[in-house]
Image: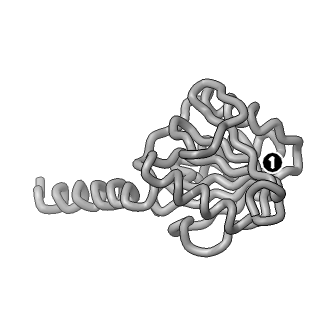
Amino acid sequence: MNWTWIILAASVVVIVFGFVVAFGAPYVPTLKSQRESALDLFDFEAGQTLVELGCGDGSMVLAAAKRGLKVYGYELNPVLLLITYARTFKYRKHVILTLGNFWNGVWPRTDGIYVFLLDRYMIKLNKKIIHNYPSQKIKLVSYAFRVPDRKHISENNGMYLYEYKPSTDS
C-alpha cells in the first residue's frame, strides 16, 4: 500500500471540505424533517423560485424541485456539486447549479433564499439581500442562525423565516 497516495487523497478531501468555512459554513446535511420545515415556511407554489446558497449534497435542492420549484443552487465544493448534479438530474429542467463563491455577483431573481451559514456571515447576507433585491419581496429561511437586528416572522424546527419588503429595506 502506498501511503503517499492515501495521505495526498486525505489532504485533498480536507482542503476541499475545509476551505469553504472561510466563505460560509462547513458541509452539514439538512435532515428530511428540517428540509420539509424550511419548505413549509416558504409556503411556495409550484413554479416559484428558490435560491440555495451553499447547496451541499443537494438534499434541499432536490426536495424543492420535487415540489415543482425552480431552484438555483450555489456550491463552492466541486465534489458536493457533482453529487448534487447526480441527485437532481431527473429534475434538471427545474434545477440550475453553479460552482463558485455565491458572495460574488448578483443572484438571480427569486422568491426565496435558503441558507445554513455561520453566525458571523448573517450580517453580510442581510446586506447582500437588501442590495440585490431593493424592489422585490424576498423570503429568507435560515437554518439555525438568526439575522442580527432583524425580527424573524416565524420559526419551525430550527428554521427562521424572514421577509424583505421594498418599502422597509430600500
Q: How is the image coloured?
A: one colour
Work out whether 5 lies above or below 154: below
Looking at the image, residue 138 sits to the left or right of residue 3; the answer is: right
Quadrant of the rendered image containing residue 62: top right
Where is residue 32? Give x, y as percent: 61, 29
Image mark count: 1
Q: Which residue is drawn at 61% across and 33% down?
A: 159
Residue type, mark 1 in image: Leu
Residue occupying the point 23% across, 54% down: 10
Q: Position of residue 165 (x, y in %)?
A: 80, 53
Q: In this rendering, does residue 99 appear at all?
A: yes
Left-right relation of 83 to 79: right
**Is the residue 21 above or below the residue 161 in the image?**
below
For the question of whether residue 83 can be seen, the reply is no
* SS at circle 1: loop
**Picture coordinates of residue 155 (x, y %)?**
66, 28
Residue 91 percent location from the top left of the image: 75, 51
Q: In this view, does 18 lie to the left or right of 39?
A: left
| Location of residue 131 with respect to 46 vertically, above or below | below
The picture quadrant where one finds residue 151 is: top right
* Quadrant holding the C terminus: bottom right
Q: Point out the residue furthest to the bottom here.
A: 105
Q: Name the residue under label 1.
A: 69
Q: Residue at x 81, y 58 (%)?
A: 166
Describe residue 45's horizontal placement relative to residue 23 as left or right. Answer: right
Dot 1 crowding, Cα within 10 Å, few <14, some 14–19, many 20+: many
Q: Residue at x 40, y 58 (%)?
A: 20
